[in-house]
Amino acid sequence: MKKTIIFGAIALLGASSLTSCKKAWTCDCTFNYSGTSTTTSLPITDQKKKDAKTICGAYDKTYGTAYMSLDGYSGSCELK
């Protein structure tokens, strides 16, 4: 009986460690234009790290597309 309980506990721990954690992330975007630097922190909530990276990358593309035609613009976003 003890062995069954021990093996059951180990199996339960193993199964729970295989699931990915969803948590809150921050996407820090820094934009530079005409000598002015602006940093914006965008919250990403209840996401796995992989999904949060995708969302942060979309922020980067959204802001980059909107401003990339301006001379002297540069910017990037980083997941934290």
Image: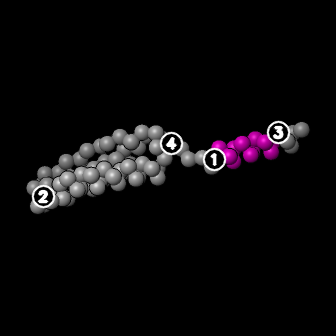
Kind of element beneath mark 3 = helix
Q: Amino acid at mark 3?
A: Ile
User: What is the CA distance from the residue labelled 1 to the residue labelled 3?
Assistant: 18 Å
- Give the overall secondary structure of the magenta segment: helix
- Label 4 vs 1, first from the N-terminus: 1
Q: Amino acid at mark 4?
A: Lys
**Location of mark 2 (residue):** 70
Indicate whether residue 69 is drawn in magenta: no
Q: Which residue is mark 3?
A: 5
Instruction: Name the N-terminal-most of marks 1 and 2.
Output: 1
Mark 3 vs mark 4: give the one in front: 4
Q: For the magenta stretch, what is the residue range? A: 5-16
Q: Is residue 78 above or below residue 2?
A: below
x then y, percent, for residue 65: 22, 56
Magenta span contains residue 15: yes
Q: Nearer the viewer, mark 4 or mark 2?
A: 2
The residue that label 4 is drawn on is: 22
Which of disc 3 and disc 1 is earlier in sequence? 3
